[in-house]
Amino acid sequence: MVQIILTGPTASGKGSVAFELAGRLGASIACMDSMKIYRGMDIVTAKPPPERRSQCRYHLIDLVGPEDSFSVGRYLPLLEEVVETEGAASRPLVISGGTGLYLKGFLDGLADGPGADWEIRERLVREAREHGIERLHERLEEVDPVAARKLESFNERRIIRALEFFESSGERLSDSWNWEAPREPRRDVVLFGLGWEREALYARANKRVLAMVELGLFQECESLLNREPPPGRSASQCIGLREIREGLEAGQSREAIIEAIQKNTRNFIKRQLTWFRKMDIEWLPVEGELDPAGAAEAILSRGD
């Protein structure tokens, strides 16, 4: 059975369109989001609201507590299990989310590798702060030139991960991940995205942050930060939670923290767009206000 994947950057409206698609198909929705897997992080990760969850079955949400670590290596077998189970029962499935690494792993395969080595990672982060990411990119060119060519010199997070992978395993990431010759493409999926002009998408992101604040973003994040055990390193990287933690520690105003969340959300969208440009996605152009029902109908008509 063919599954529809709806992907794209944060704030593009894919969650609303996925809900409309599921209603028309009688499908459930598998979330492809590295932060929605954490329990108790509902507002900050923009999980589907309770009224939607009462009308549609969602998979791969609320899997672990925020104190736990999670990775693409843990996520992919769970998604494959959902795909297999729903397919065996002849139930349609919509996969929706914007975590590019999860999507690439699902489509092209992802080799097993070591988990996060936080001691190495933190040392590399400090080095990047002190000397610049260019120095780390030069080091990566020496130990893994293929990966270095694939990663732009400004992509700090992925450069650090590639060096961490090498230092912790003694192997090159480019050897472990099938960069040059991906596996046979999956034939059981069709891949769509919502294509916004960048400035319109940035404006949507800014408004979404304000809406999250109205829903109780600060209260949710402060509760998370005060809980025992506290959020782990992975969950703590969530945009919104990170800025609130740092802002409160620095004594910043609420307005300054909101501006930081908006800025970092826009920067994240920029990185997502760069990632998705490398993928074979059928983009549905969106102008003005998003019409989720109309977008769902357009996807179904193109998927026939």
Image: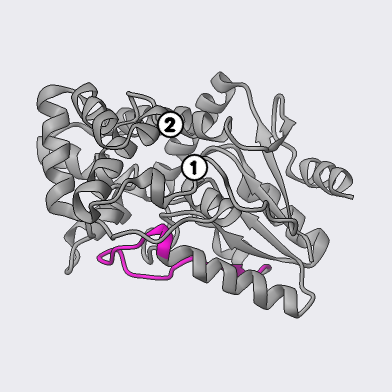
Where residue 190 appears, x then y in whole percent?
74, 50
Q: State which region is magenta.
A: 56-73
The CA span between labels 1 and 2 is 9 Å
Q: Is residue 54 visible?
A: no
Q: Does the magenta portion include 64? A: yes
For the rendered model, the colour scheme is one colour
- Give the mark nearer the N terminus: 1 vs 2: 2
Q: Which disc is residue 179 wearing?
A: 1
- Label 1's element? loop
- Label 2's element? helix
Where is mark 2, residue-wise? 150
| Label 1 with label 2: CB-CB less than 8 Å | yes
Q: Residue at the spot x=49%, y=48% of the render?
A: 178
Q: Looking at the picture, tell me which residue is in the foreground, 124 or 166.
A: 166
Where residue 275 appears, x then y in whole percent?
51, 34
Kind of residue indicated by mark 1: Trp
